[in-house]
Structures are given as structure tokens and as C-alpha cells.
Image (tube, rainbow, N blue to C red):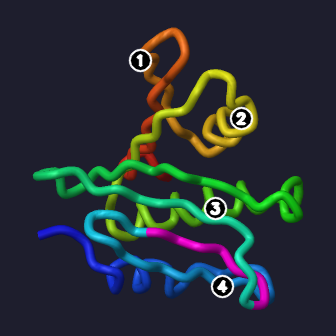
Amino acid sequence: MGYWIEDFENALREFVLPEGISIAVTKERFNFTFKLRLENKDMGGFTFNSFDNVQDVMESCKTYVLYEYQGKGYAQLMQEIKRYICKRLPLSLVANVSIYNETQIHILKKFGWMEVPLSHRTHMWYLDHRSYT
């Protein structure tokens, strides 16, 4: 079956964004890209990649905040958006993160992602939609 852009747009319909901020969703093959925009300027974004034959788990990757918007809480806002989408669809996420990416690890821990060591340099993180209260 899989997901469509409309599934994500509908899941986000009730999410309250700060004034002037919008989310644009696009799809290319098996990837969904979410761009956070302030007055039609890109601020950052993230991508969900789907897996073959797996309906309820996607990979969260390519999360970024442009330099001029860093340190203002937008990476945390994107985590809130991801969590909201996952709860609404329902969908679980996985992410591979370098152990040296301290900022991303701090944010993942804060938002309830579970850590699974893969190697001495990379750990997988898992956000289970069933863990929300």
C-alpha cells in the first residue's frame, strides 16, 4: 500500500506551527521530503525514506537547519513534527546517527528516541509510535 503526500498533509493539518512558518511536502520515488519554510524561504527540513515491504516503519534522514536559523529551536520543532506525524498515521521511524553528532543525539534523546548501537561510530535510533502517551 504505502503512503502518499496526502497522508502526510492530512496528518499535519491540525499541527499548530509558529506564525509565518509552513511545511512543504514533496515525494520522489520512495522518499518524502519535508521543508520548513519561513515566509517562503527554506529554513531546514528532513526526509522519510520508505522500506520495501515494510508499511509502518520509515527511515528519518537528512535532517538539517540552515545556518542562519540554527540555535532558535527549529530542529526541535522538526522533531515535534516528526512525532506528530508518526502518532497520526501511525508510523515508526529509524535513524542512523554518528556518535559524534552530539546536537542530534541530544535532540533525539529529548524526544524519546531509543538508541541501538550498531558499531563503534554509528548508532541506530528508533522512535516507536506506540510509545506515545
Quote the CA–CA distance across marks 3 and 1.
25 Å
To which residue does mark 4 refer?
A: 22
* Residue topped by disc 3: 78
Is 9 placed left or right of 43 in the picture? left
Seen in the picture, residue 29 relative to 46 is either above or below; the reply is below
* Residue in the picture at 68% in, 65% down: 44
- Looking at the image, which residue sits at the far top? 120
Q: Which residue is located at x 65 percent, y 74 percent?
A: 36
SS category of the residue bearing label 2 = helix
Q: Amino acid at mark 2?
A: His
Q: Circle 1 sits on which residue?
A: 118
Which structural element holds mark 1? loop
User: What residue is pinned by disc 2?
Assistant: 106
Bounds of the magenta segment: 33-39
Spatial CA span between label 1 and label 2 = 18 Å
- Which residue sits at x=49%, y=49%? 61
The reply to whether the C-beta atoms of the residues labelled 3 and 1 are less than 8 Å apart is: no
Disc 4 or 3, which lies upstream in sequence?
A: 4
Query: The residue under label 4 is which amino acid type?
Result: Ser
Rendering coords of residue 80 (x, y %): 62, 61
Identify which amino acid the numbered label 3 is placed on.
Met
